[in-house]
Amino acid sequence: MSDKQKRFFLSEDEIPRQWYNIQADMVTKPLPPIHPATHQPLKAEDLYPIFAKELCHQELDTEHAWIDIPEEVRDMYKYYRSTPLVRAYGLEKALGTPAHIYFKNESVSPVGSHKLNSALAQAYYCKQEGITNVTTETGAGQWGAALSYAAKVFGLEAAVYQVKISYEQKPYRRSIMQTYGAQVTPSPSMSTRAGKDVLTRDPNNQGSLGTAISEAVELAMTTPNCKYVLGSVLNHVSLHQTVIGLEAEKQMEMAGEYPDIVIACFGGGSNFGGISFPFMRHKIKEGKQTRFIAAEPSSCPKLTRGVFQYDFGDLSGLTPLLPMYTLGHNFMPANIHAGGLRYHGAGMIISQLLKDGYMEAVDIVQSESFKAGLMFSKCEGIIPAPESCHAIAATIREANKCKETGEEKVILFNLSGHGLIDMTAYDQFLAGSLLDFEVTDEEVAKNIAELDKII
């Protein structure tokens, strides 16, 4: 391998100075979010009580394709960006595929995942507005860790509601958040009306991202000088994550190749949008035939088996109504270890892009994802997060197709985070005790029917 370049980096000067807003270039714009009380299209001012004002305007901006990255945020990016683009020669050899496989390694950030890209931006805008406290939800804990660190960087106090099953499965992620100074509460909890309502109905409820969002939003709305921040789903979060794909564009040029296929795991859409949107603009504007594949868990298949309609982003109906592919905001996913992918709906932009045929989605069972993660760790030396394992599994599927057809395609996937704090899940997989969960057609239909009654 001595004559082959394996890793590609950018200099500090080459780190992007603007984020890319794909909404400006979309042929069909996403439908507007709807105010839950008036049922009228949302205005930026309607979001002011929840989010920092600049984030509200970024969320609804369908005109400006490029938005400047504040210099204070870019200065923090320089601590870990650019992240490397890596040619996965080991994985290619193990698969015996003619495909060229590359991955963008976001696990090298201080908190071990891509989540910091948006956490720094959101914390900065809150600080600029004079906010003193921020609150959020987290599943596996990667977003919670990122926000806890970003809050400390900009002198904010952070309160995190972590989905209870992940709080119990991943105690060290909780410890990381507390190390950075955040207050961490398992959700559902008795500290909010939303949490109390859930526990009254089901005292043993293990939580969901929808429930944790309800609790965090309620806290933000009832606490002076406090704003809510979000790690995925919404447009402004994907906007901040496009630093990933913008770097990857330049790095693929350095490698002398262009991706035929771009893949990322999918929960709400932040890391998928981050890696894919900069490349997708060439498909929209120039007709490039790159395929974009979102890999979601079979236990929470909103893209592959959900319906496209307006739904709440949280369990209690505190958020605006969003046009999304959804399984229903009252959907309770199985307790898989990929806690960051256990969300009932997809972001508005991605939902519209899927609806218009610009991308596709696949669902992966838990055992297949961990088998892929184990293979990747042996070939490339990096133990991936359970969420990232889904992207690797989808990549292996595509690489094996190339082996069958003899096509030398270029595949790029986003390694959204490492799994060094997820070894309990790997222990279970190695012991043969990890279970697969798949939603039946009857369960999907029943849940969606319930949604029709509510909205």
Image (tube, rainbow, N blue to C red):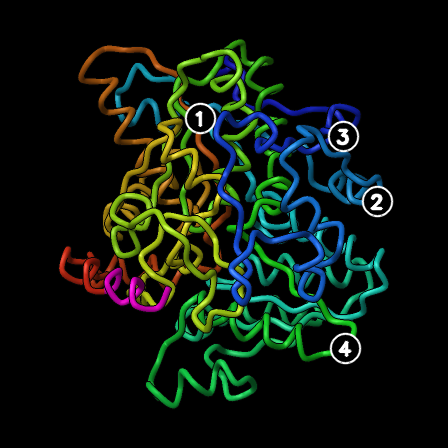
**Of helix, strand and loop, which mostly describes the magenta segment?**
helix
Residue 169 in percent (x, y) is at 40, 70
Q: For this rendering, which residue is in front, 39 or 52?
A: 39
Sequence-wise first label, 3 or 1:
3
Please give the residue where the numbered disc 2 appears in the rendered image.
Answer: 72
**Residue 406 location, x and y as percent?**
23, 10
How far is the residue under mark 4 from the one under mark 1? Answer: 44 Å
Residue 47 sits in which quadrant?
bottom right
Q: How far is the residue under mark 3 from the one under mark 1? A: 23 Å
Residue type beneath disc 1: Leu
Name the residue that disc number 4 marks: 224
For marks 4 and 2, the one nearer the N-term is: 2
Q: Are discs 4 and 1 less than 8 Å apart at CB?
A: no
- Asked where in the image residue 225 lies, by quadrant, the reply is bottom right
237 horizontally vs 303: left or right: right
Residue under the point 29% across and 31% down: 396
Decide which of 93, 334 is in the foreground and name it.
334
Disc 3: which residue = 17
Circle 2: element type: helix
User: What residue is shown at x 48% (from left), y 45% (from top)?
Assistant: 348
Helix, strand or loop at label 4? It is loop
Q: Residues within 10 Å of mark 3 (few under 14, many from 20)?
A: some
Question: Which contiguous range is marked in magenta?
Answer: 447-455
